[in-house]
Image: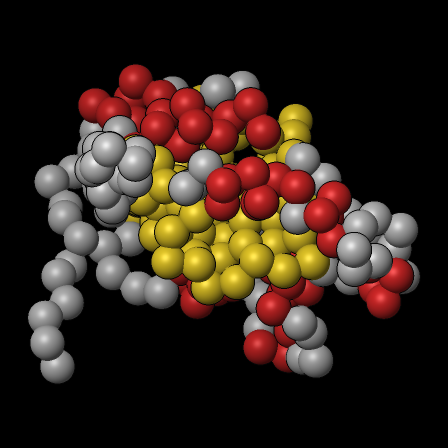
Amino acid sequence: MLIAGQLGISQTKQEIYMLFDRYEQQGLLFNMNFKEASTTAGKAAYRGELVLVEGEVGDAAGRRKPPTEVMRGAVLLSDGDKLEMAAGMLNDVSEVPLFFEKYGEDLVPGAKLLFFVVNVAKPLFTEFGGQTSALIPLQDGMVWNELIDELKLEKGDFKGQSAADKVLTVAGAFADYKPKYPTVGWDEVVATKTNAVREARGPV
């Protein structure tokens, strides 16, 4: 087995990828961009889409149809078998509970959570599933670009870094992420959601 000593750490590759390997085996990683170990012991990053609701079983072999709901542009950081950070884009505030139903048990206490939500009324913090999440309105845009803007990072902050270490840098930026957004109860978040829909992209 490949040892991750090249990264100066003792875990095997299998141990580093433990959480994301499990997700992949369960069919929860979709349109994967990358799944990669960082240079910090035990931490790995994933970018791609994250399944919130699986598709129906499509044949006798148990193969599923494409998922019906995903978190697009997901940016995840794991530490061993726990999820330390999650960001991505959701079409509706109703998808926030879907994320916690699926992945809440894997979150570390005080996980770094930021979701761009098409129809949330305003930038805010809310409590759900024992965690605090930032919800930011967004109808169109690239999650990664919006995320680094929201965290006030610049291209120079990522100079010379691997794809996984860039995610590590994003996670580190949450230490200084203290926008003056209101904290809103979940019932109010749902009650005040807008009619906004994701901007469709047609052929160029």
| Above-or-below relation of 150 to 60 | below
The answer to whether residue 66 shows anywhere in this view is yes
Question: Residue 142's spot in the image, x, y percent?
Answer: 36, 65
Quadrant of the drawing holding the C terminus:
bottom left
Quarter location, residue 28: top left
Which sits in the foreground, 20 or 115?
A: 20
Q: Tell me where residue 71 appears, x and y as whole percent.
A: 35, 45
Is 183 displayed left or right of 139 in the figure? right
Q: Residue 86 appears at what percent x and percent y?
A: 52, 44
Residue 65 higher or lower than 171, as above or below: above
| Picture residue at 30% right of the left edge, 18% below the top | 187
Taking the spot 70% from the left edge, 80% from the top edge, the residue there is: 160
For the point 56% across and 38% down, which residue is it? 22
Q: Reply above or below: 91 against 75.
A: above
Nearest to the observer: residue 1 or residue 179: 1
Quadrant position of residue 144: bottom left
Q: Quadrant of the N terminus?
A: bottom right
**As drawn, is 66 to the left or to the right of 143?**
left
